[in-house]
Amino acid sequence: MKGSRIFAKFTTLDIVLMAMLATLNGVMTVYLSMINKTLNSLGGPIATSAIVGLYMIYGLLAYYIIRKPGTAVIAYAFGAVVQSFMGSAYGIASIIAAAVCYMVAAELVFALLRYRRWNAVSLMLVGGAMVPLWFIVAANMFGYMHWGWKVLTIALVVRILSGIVLCGLLTKVLGDALNGTGLLKRFELGRTSRA
C-alpha cells in the first residue's frame, strides 16, 4: 500500500460497511448469548471461551476490507452503540469496555505492522492480540478471579486460540470470499487484489 493511501480519509461506503457489519454483529450477539449460556452449563468458563473470537470478528473484517487506520475505533464504536440499543445480559458498561479493549489492541497491532501486512498470519495475530486486555478487564468486572489461576489460565489460552481462529483466520476466509464475489471493488481489499 502506498504511503499516501495509508492515511486516506474514510468514504461514505467505508462508514456504511462498518455500520452494516456492526448491525450484523448486534443480531449475531443475541444468538451467541444463547449459545454462550448453553456452553456455560455444559463446560463452564472454559467452554464459553471457545466462541469468544466470534464476538470480535466484525471489527477485524471491516479492517481487513477497508485497511485504513482508525477502522477498529469506528467499527467497534458502532458495534457498542448497536449492542447498547439491542440490550445485553452483561450491561452497557461491559459492551463499551469490550469495544475499547478491542479497538486499542487492533489499532496497536496494525500500527506495528505499519498497515502493510494483510495475510492470514497477520490477521490471526490481531485476532489473538485482542483477547488479553479484555480478559483482564472482564476478569475484574465479572469476578472471574474466583475461578482460580488454573481455570483462568486455561480460559485465557482457549480465548486466545478462539481469537486466532474464529476471528483472525475466519476474517481472512470471509473477506476473501466476499472479495471473490466482486462486491468489494470499491474498497482497498478489492483494489489491491486486482493490482
Image: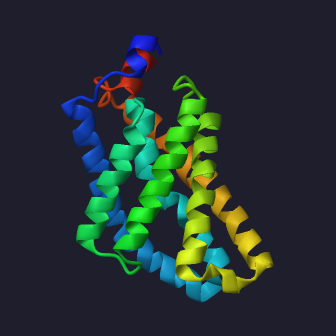
Q: Quadrant of residue 95?
A: bottom left
Q: Residue 4 appears at what percent x and percent y?
A: 39, 12
Q: Nearer the viewer, residue 195 or 151?
A: 151
Q: Nearer the viewer, residue 88 or 92?
A: 92
Question: Which residue shows up at 43% across the image and 37% down it?
Answer: 63
Question: Which residue shows up at 59% across the image and 83% down it?
Answer: 143
Q: Nearer the viewer, residue 12 or 57?
A: 12
Q: Is residue 160 visible?
A: yes
- Please tell me whether residue 5 is drawn above or below residue 184 in the rendered image: above
Q: How is the image coloured?
A: rainbow
Question: Which residue shows up at 67% across the image and 75% down it?
Answer: 46
* Horizontal relation, residue 37 to residue 43: left or right: left
Q: Residue 138 appears at what percent x and percent y?
A: 55, 71
Q: Is residue 62 visible?
A: no
Question: Which residue shows up at 49% across the image and 59% down it?
Answer: 54
- Please tell me whether residue 51 is drawn above or below residue 169 in the rendered image: below
* Horizontal relation, residue 187 to residue 37: left or right: left
Q: Quadrant of residue 137?
A: bottom right
